[in-house]
Image: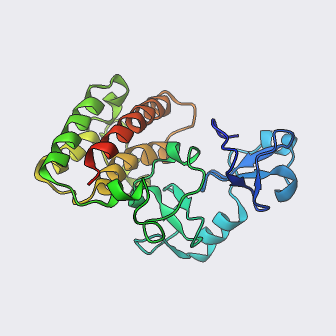
Amino acid sequence: MPATVKKDKLYCICKTRYDPKKFYVGCDVCSNWFHGSCVGINETMAKNMTEYICDECRNARENREIYCICQQPYDETQFYIGCEKCSDWFHGRCVGILQSEADHIDEYLCPRCAPTSQLNVPNQKRLTADDYEAIKKLVKQLWANRSSIPFHHPVNTSDVPNYYEVVKEPMDLSTVDKKVNNGDYTKLCEFIGDVMRIFENCRFFNQPNSSIMKSAESLEDFFSQKLSHLRERVKP
């Protein structure tokens, strides 16, 4: 189950609150959690699975349905979060929501349904010069974090020959830093999305328990903590 269980959040296809007496399995795409009994998976089966993808996410992948404010078909390399009001699914990078943040949100409402929400206001606000100064400071903090070392520069093909055959949207901290200094971001969610891309690419390409994945998870946790302060700084 998620690291933090919210008492008011509804889980599974049956839309019920968390019950510690029941067995759950988590979808690796949408990060929702499902009763094993509701989706036909027991604990023994779960132990032998490398991933679980719920029916809704599987149908989206197979049918190439259109999602998000970017109106793109399902992409298995990206994290999605579902709006509780309009029932659409959004790329975390498009709306500025980290995968590690999703479990802490009781009810997510997208920018279309709740433009004035606590998350959507700073994420969608047009950046000012003062906002850019705060972002530059955060980029320096990310760069200085020891877990960020593998992500400072683009992946070298001499070290990983097939990387760019698998990862179609590469990203690294030096590229993020360059875009910040050039003023390429108009909204905070765009900056968040590029940093998220580093973590998503790492998850997609590497094994879950590898050393580089541990570095990515550590850096994502650090970024999440700093991001909450950044959002407060950029609020109107």
Residue 94 picture location, percent across and down: 39, 61
| Residue under the point 85% across and 41% down | 43
* Quarter of the image that includes the C terminus: bottom left
Left or right of 223 in this view: 106:
right
Choose between 234 and 23: the one closer to the eye: 234
Quarter-of-image position of residue 216: top left
Of residues 29 and 221, the one nearer the viewer is 221
Residue appearing at x 32%, y 44% in the figure = 232
**Could you tell me which residue is drawn at 47 percent across and 70 percent down?**
68
Residue in the foreground of this view, choosing between 40 and 209: 40
x%, y% of residue 163? 39, 47
Residue 21 placement (x, y as % from top left): 87, 39
Q: Relative to residue 84, is residue 10 drawn left or right?
A: right
Left or right of 158, for residue 29: right
- Taking the view exactly as shown, the residue that stands out farthest to the top is 146
Above or below for 122 versus 23: below
Above or below: residue 169 compared with residue 137: below
Image quadrant containing the N terminus: top right
Q: Is residue 7 above or below residue 166?
A: above
**Residue at 30 percent of width and 32 percent of height:** 142
Q: In this rendering, would 204 be left or right of 131?
A: right
Q: How many marks?
A: 0
Res. 202 visible in picture: yes
Residue 89 place in picture, x, y as percent: 54, 66
Q: How is the image coloured?
A: rainbow
Q: Is residue 76 visible?
A: no
